[in-house]
Image: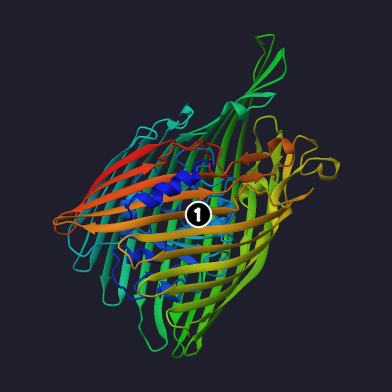
Amino acid sequence: MKKTHSLFVILSLLPCHVAFANSENSTHQTGKSEKKDDVIVISANRTETSLWDSPVTMQVIDSEQLAKFSGDSITEALRDIPGVTVTDSGMPGRKQIRIRGEIPDRVLILIDGQEFSYQRLYGAGLLIDSESVERIEVVKGPHSVLYGARAIGGVVNFITRKGGKKAIQGDIKTGYDTSARGNFESGSLYGSSNGFDYRISGSNYNYGDRHTPDGTLKDTDFANHSVSSWLGYQFDQHKFGLSLERLQLNTQTYTSADMLAPPLIKFNVNIPNMIYKKVGTFYDYNADGTFWKNLHLDYYDQQIERHFRNNILLQPIPILQIKQNYAVDDRQSTKGGNIQSDFELFQGNKLIIGTQYIRDHVDQHSLTKKGTSINGRPRPETTLKSYDAWKQESWSAFAQDEWRLAKNWTWAVGARQYWLKSKSLNNNADQGKTESSDQHMVGSTSLRYSGFENTELRLSYAQGYVYPTLFKQFAQSSAGNEGITYGNPKLKAEQSDNIEFGVRYKNANWLLDSAIYYAKARDYITTRKCGVDNAQICHGNLDPSQYYDNANKAKTYGLEFQVEYNAWQIVPYISGNLMRREIDLETRKTTKTGDPRFTSKIGLKNSHFFEKWELESDLYARVASKADNHTSTNNLNDSHNAGWTTANLELNAYLGAERQYRAGLQLNNLLDQRYITANESIPSPGFSAIFSIGMNF
């Protein structure tokens, strides 16, 4: 953080300023006076609610904000939300989300309220057509009552565009990113007429190798291509919808020289092809009765096909080399649906009752080739083929009841019951059929008080629940010189408890949203070394092989905040997260979990109106403290990320009678800082620019 002082000098001198309103302040970008309940959200209570009355900590990225963002993924729009981390996890273009220190496996991703399910060890990335998204709602903290398993960290709901205000509308956007010689194009056509809604959209991202202050990084190129569509029809009180999505990703791992340690001298993972396809159907009935208000049904069929290639070269002694090529082609088929009814039993009451079903089926074909050479002379290769198939089914029923106890007091309580079953249909690892099951109930409650002027206070308690993936229960995997990692069908579900106290305040000049949170998680799934006591799970193999087990615990507490002052033409703002996280490992406890204690965004923004056009500007700094990670099973894999600060400038110009033309310029890392963000292995780009132009019609 050597250049921090010079950065704040720049911030104080340059009057350029608009920006990212990274929550409900999306309605204040032009400095106009708006009603506090203008922003309507779905994800807070699974039904339309004003963001002001939300009982949970959440942020919204609306369509106007999304139109400004350029770069390699729409996920970048979430980067500055307090408590949220965006990472490639070592594979460029495969964006993943962490919330309050929880890994992507513990963050629930929804697309129009339908769960994105991925049963392998690491998340598939956010596979969604960026041009289809109209709004993103982020709920932080465990909310497994309303949204199901995998919501220990939080919920990210991508809500797609369903139509328009006219019969024919559309937008197109293109741009260029100098950080990786990347180009992107996107466009959509949409509209509404005579009860019909439609949208056709697509996006294309082609990025080369990343440029950093230390040079160009090999194997950091990637490509994403997506198309999607929506067709809806409404008559009387009924509304039907059909959505289609397809995305294709091509990427690989980045491996630096210091990541390789003897006997590992070469390591590469390549995903030459990952294809995501989904068909979703929706039905809504607006009953609008005295007691019965709404009925919602949806069903979806999701397919993920993945080609995975892993090449390893080991040299345990100078005269011996071991080469291993591992190829996996797998397919996951997911079928699921939701049913929900909304009731109002009396004035001031909101009752939600629903059920959810998800069925995942995974087929995996793998081919392993091993070869050795002694003094440069190759020996005969061995080839091993295998086929694995697994299935997981889950049913759940949920309910939440909300009462207005008095004029300024609102109380809600909810619960969800789970029934889950996993089965190995054909597993070469155990050469038999293995099953596991679980039944569990989680609960939540919240209390809100609105008796102070322009202020909303909220207090909530919620439980989280994450059932282990099929991969962790049944699969075998190997990488580098770490031996084999075995699945464990006896794994228990991960669970957590979360308490939050939050304050929202808004008047003509000030906007404040903050939350204090505490979470305690248990039965975290980790890996243990194979030994005599677990010989059955490890099939008789010993260290360095390992297996999955419930061992870790975690405590997380922190403060999230956003403050904005709108009384001046140049608007100052600051947001951030102050977090401390403690992991209880099998052999030790540590607060060095790879997460920075402090992250923040601070800046100045401004909107200036000229005679025929408007200029929005935002000059800001991103700040992160150091992040040490001592959670590995041995000290050799401990890591250290230094703290960093970057200066950035964004300009957006709007032209036309309806601001239908836009030109954007993002200047990132103005001081050409050398840094790596926490939980990432790829160095970040140096000074770079992103140019973009767009048009609405």
Amino acid type, residue under disc 1 in the picture: Ser
In the picture as drawn, the residue positioned furthest to the right comes out as: 532
Find disc 1 in the rendering and name its residue. Answer: 600
Front position in the image: 82 or 671 = 671
Front position in the image: 230 or 265 = 265
Q: Please tell me whether mark 1 sits on a helix, a strand or a loop.
A: strand
Q: Position of residue 87 (x, y in %)?
A: 51, 45
Front position in the image: 247 or 237 = 247
Depicted 183 relative to depicted 236: above or below: above
613 relative position to 66: left or right? left
Quadrant for the C terminus in the image? bottom left
* Quarter-of-image position of residue 50: bottom left
* Quarter-of-image position of residue 193: bottom left
Depicted 453 relative to depicted 583: above or below: below
Depicted 602 relative to depicted 416: above or below: above
Quadrant for the N terminus in the image? top right
Could you tell me how many numbered marks the image carries? 1
Front position in the image: 679 or 363 = 679
